[in-house]
Amino acid sequence: MAISSPPAVRRPPLPAIPLVIAEERCKGCEICVAACPKDALALDLRRVNVLGYHPVTLVDAAACTSCAFCARVCPDAVFTVWTASHEERPR
């Protein structure tokens, strides 16, 4: 009797979160806001982080293209940029 492997199961796609921001380390310099070509970032003027600054926040997740310009210019490395795999991208 041969043992067969179970059928391959694809995991469901993760929620579309293109950008994770370590807001507790953000100094509110706004360099990333100026670098974003889609105007998807802004300072959250309603909150203050543990450093005493207004942190940057993603205001339009649908507009974010995961270009990583924000991560490249950030002096404090607060960004983690995610992109969809080739299978998950719309054609």
Image: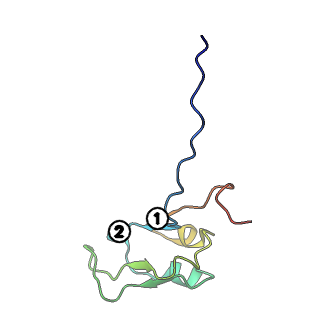
The residue labelled by disc 1 is 77
Give the image location of residue 18, x and y in percent: 53, 67
Residue at the spot x=37%, y=79% of the render?
A: 55
Image quadrant in which the C terminus is located: bottom right
**Residue extending furthest right?**
91
Instruction: Name above or below for residue 52 compared with residue 72.
Output: below
Q: How is the image coloured?
A: rainbow
Quick one: 89 or 11, which is closer to the camera?
11
What separation in Å lies between label 2 and label 1 (alpha carbons)? 8 Å
- Mark 2 lies on a secondary structure that is helix
**Residue extending furthest front?**
1
- Mark 1 lies on a secondary structure that is loop
Give the image location of residue 25, x and y in percent: 35, 68
Quick one: 32 or 67, which is closer to the camera?
67
Instruction: Name above or below for residue 88 compared with residue 33.
Output: above
The residue labelled by disc 2 is 25
